[in-house]
Amino acid sequence: MKDNINSLIDVYIKENNKEELWNLAEKYENKIDLEKIANYYIEEKSDFYICELISLVGEYLNLDEIFEKIIATKDEEFIFWIVKNPIIKNIIDDNYLQKLNNYLKNGK
């Protein structure tokens, strides 16, 4: 079953179907490749969906790695909207928000 679901992830990425990826994460949580979904949302610079994914299954994600990848995009608008997302502000450690804010202020 896990292989079939992970194959669906590839299909939804190819179709650029962010909502269905989120639905898979909601339904299967840690039984699927959440990192692949997170990486896709970051590559697509989808601030809404990466925030939603973190709020939904953040306990199964390597948040240190996720936030480093977000910063590595060097996309100030993408990072700005993540910082401003009310969902993120309430669920993640302040340290992550501080890293994002530091990048916005200093470019580092």
Image (cartoon, rainbow, N blue to C red):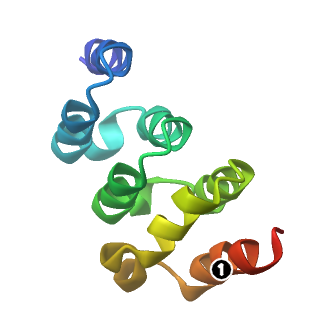
> x, y percentage for residue 37?
42, 36
Give residue 27's quadrant in the image: top left
Residue visible at 49% across and 53% down? 61
- Numbered disc 1: secondary structure: helix
Question: In the image shown, does 45 or 21 lie closer to the viewer?
Answer: 45
Residue visible at 73% across and 51% down? 72
Give the side of residue 93 with respect to residue 21, left or right: right
Give the side of residue 58 with respect to residue 86, left or right: right
> x, y percentage for residue 7?
33, 12
Residue visible at 17% across and 39% down? 23
Give the side of residue 14 with respect to residue 21, left or right: right
> x, y percentage for residue 63?
56, 61
User: What amino acid is found at the position of numbered circle 1 in the picture?
Assistant: Asn
Give residue 6's quadrant in the image: top left
Q: Which residue is mark 1?
A: 101
Q: Is residue 86 above or below residue 37?
A: below
Q: Quadrant of the N terminus?
A: top left
Q: Residues within 10 Å of mark 1 (few under 14, many from 20)?
A: some
